[in-house]
């Protein structure tokens, strides 16, 4: 899924289910806010006020916390080892050799 931000700063997730009234579901709003807050640019004053109003809801805060916790769990995941090292290991070894300037034939 990708979060697209409109000129007004409102996020819209691709491939999301919408609520009964055509609104984003709370978890989807939480994901939008998470992506927005993780961006390298600061929030403008209007967006900051919308964020604060959105966070006033205990349900929204709970959804946001669950998104943050899920992200932290994802970061702790270990990559699945590939049997026999696989082609990615060979590519990584070649990259290491090239970055050190060593000649693999010597």
Image: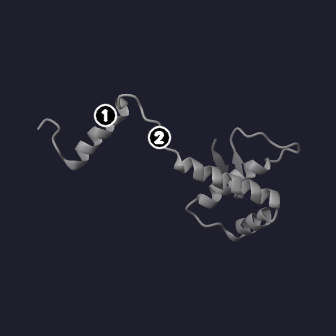
Residue 55 seen: yes
Q: Which residue is located at x 73 percent, y 48 percent? A: 28
Residue at the limit of the structure toward the bottom, as seen here = 45
Give coordinates of residue 33: x percent, y percent: 69, 57
Q: Which residue is located at x 70 percent, y 71 percent? A: 45
* Disc assigned to residue 90: 1
Give coordinates of residue 23: x percent, y percent: 82, 47
Q: Nearer the viewer, residue 81 or 23?
A: 81
Q: Which residue is located at x 71 percent, y 65 percent? A: 47
Give coordinates of residue 13: x percent, y percent: 69, 45
Q: Which residue position holds label 2?
A: 79
Which dot, 2 or 1, sits closer to the camera?
Answer: 2
Residue at the limit of the structure toward the right, as seen here = 21
Q: Which residue is located at x 75 percent, y 53 percent? A: 63
Please indicate whether residue 86 sits to the left or right of residue 7 in the image.
Answer: left
Q: Nearer the viewer, residue 66 or 3?
A: 66
* Disc assigned to residue 31: none
Residue 10 seen: no
Against 8, residue 48 (above or below) is below
């Amino acid at each position: 899924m990708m979060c697209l931000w409109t000129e007004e700063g409102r996020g819209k997730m691709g491939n999301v289910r919408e609520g009964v009234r055509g609104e984003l579901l709370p978890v989807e709003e939480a994901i939008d806010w998470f992506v927005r807050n993780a961006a390298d640019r600061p929030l403008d004053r209007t967006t900051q006020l919308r964020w604060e109003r959105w966070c006033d809801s205990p349900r929204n805060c709970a959804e946001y916390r669950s998104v943050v916790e899920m992200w932290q769990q994802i970061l702790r995941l270990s990559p699945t080892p590939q049997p026999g090292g696989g082609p990615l290991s060979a590519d990584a070894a070649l990259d290491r050799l090239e970055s050190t300037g060593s000649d693999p034939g010597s």
